[in-house]
Amino acid sequence: MKRYVMANRPDGVADVVFEDDLEPHFATNRFRELWLNTETPAETSDPRDPVADQHMNHEPPDGGAVFRMLVFAPKQDTPDLTPEQMIEMHKTIHSVHIPSLEYLRTAKHPTMHKTDTLNYFVLTEGEIWSLSEGKDVLLKAGDVMIQRGCMHGWRNDSDKRAVLAAILIDSKPA
């Protein structure tokens, strides 16, 4: 899997200005930020890579959007995380809404969380459960999930990794 970024060079010619191999990154990290814009309409003339530092904030900046890839390890390679560990993870990635310990202890899965975003997800590889507080959906490669500022989570029950492309757009809180 590779990332290509196309833009106008200083001479005005459209060209590939960034190119990355994502697989080595996924060997040690569960996510990879692909792009970030801090406003809409987006600024497209800045030649810098806005995600070069790979610092993850769960939600995009106010008025912005983030595009990322998430890799979910096979079930046998996924440790069972406690609600306390999930809360610490949410603190690390600066989640706006951190579920309470009481909520996570009774939730159907410890990954349940909420964001103030409109989310577009496309499963590109494998299969994964998209969890809600009601009906859960087993997504398969090529399936799309659109989430609108609601509580949700993820669970990979298969023996293969699942790869999810995610675009999170800042939204008004639901």
Image: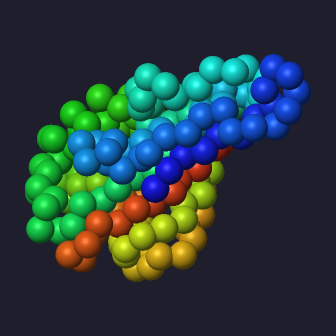
Residue at the extreme right of the image, as rendered: 12
Image position of 137 with respect to 154: above or below:
below
Q: Locate residue 136, reporting x and y percent.
A: 40, 76
Identify the residue at image location x=24%, y=42%. Answer: 28
Q: Is residue 125 visible?
A: yes
Identify the residue at image location x=12%, y=49%. Answer: 82
Q: Is residue 50 left or right of 163 when viewed as pictured?
A: right
Q: Is residue 65 visible?
A: no
User: 161 or 109, which lies in front?
Assistant: 161
Identify the residue at image location x=15%, y=41%. Answer: 84
Count of numbered marks: 0
Q: Locate residue 120, reporting x and y percent.
A: 60, 58
Identify the residue at image location x=49%, y=40%. Answer: 20
Q: Locate residue 105, reporting x and y percent.
A: 17, 54
Q: Quadrant of residue 66?
A: top right
Q: Locate residue 38, reporting x and y percent.
A: 66, 26
Q: Quadrant of residue 121?
A: bottom right
Q: Quadrant of residue 159?
A: bottom left
